[in-house]
Amino acid sequence: MRIKPYEPGEGAQLNAIFCSAILRTARRGYSEQQVRVWAAQAADAHEYDERAADGRLLLVAVDEQNKPIAYADLEPDGHIDHLFCHPDAGRKGVASALYDELELAAVAWKLQRLYVEASEIARPFFARKGFTLIRRNDFDLEGTPIHHYVMEKLLY
């Protein structure tokens, strides 16, 4: 596995990772209805090109065949918007390696903190990375109650 910057045109592969992660992994912490509604929020493939051009860092982890297996992004204000790993690549250190690269970039950018809205599944991961819980955020997504956790990590 290696980590590289996003390349234009990889959006469809990242979208597939997003959907697979939600449809297969998120079931451990969310209902079937919540998973379906969340997965329906997937970006169009071209939106990843737009994300990569808006000032954020968008990194992709690829396997030995150069196939994307996970991705993560860091916005200039320290917000980690996405960190998704294909379920077949889970529990192998891929997400951890991606996160570590984001944190290195945040330090290089001289950011004071990182923050995230972590899912039920991602909350323990971010806690292991030193994030503290700020609050649980309950909201409706397309009329379906769902939640995530606002978490932050102070860097200095």
Image (tube, grey):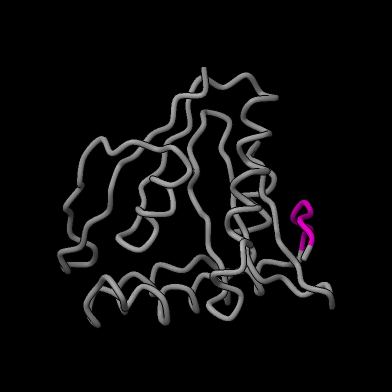
Would residue 63 appear left or right of 155 to someone viewing this image? right
In the rendered view, would you say 76 is above or below 81?
above
Identify the residue at image location x=68%, y=33%: 105
- Report how many numbered discs are placed on residues in the image: 0
Displayed quadrant of residue 9: bottom right
Q: Nearer the viewer, residue 112 or 143?
A: 112
Q: Residue furthest right?
A: 65
- Image x and y of residue 73, in percent: 59, 48
- Image x and y of residue 72, in percent: 59, 53
Displayed quadrant of residue 66: bottom right
Residue 6 is covered by the magenta coloring? yes
Would residue 127 appear left or right of 133 to someone viewing this image? right
In the rendered view, would you say 33 is above or below 107?
below
Looking at the rendering, in which quadrant would you find the N terminus?
Answer: bottom right
In the rendered view, would you say 8 is above or below 12?
above
- Image x and y of residue 36, in percent: 31, 79
Range shown magenta: 2-8
Q: Nearer the viewer, residue 104 or 21?
A: 104
- Image x and y of residue 53, in percent: 69, 44
Identify the residue at image location x=51%, y=19%: 112
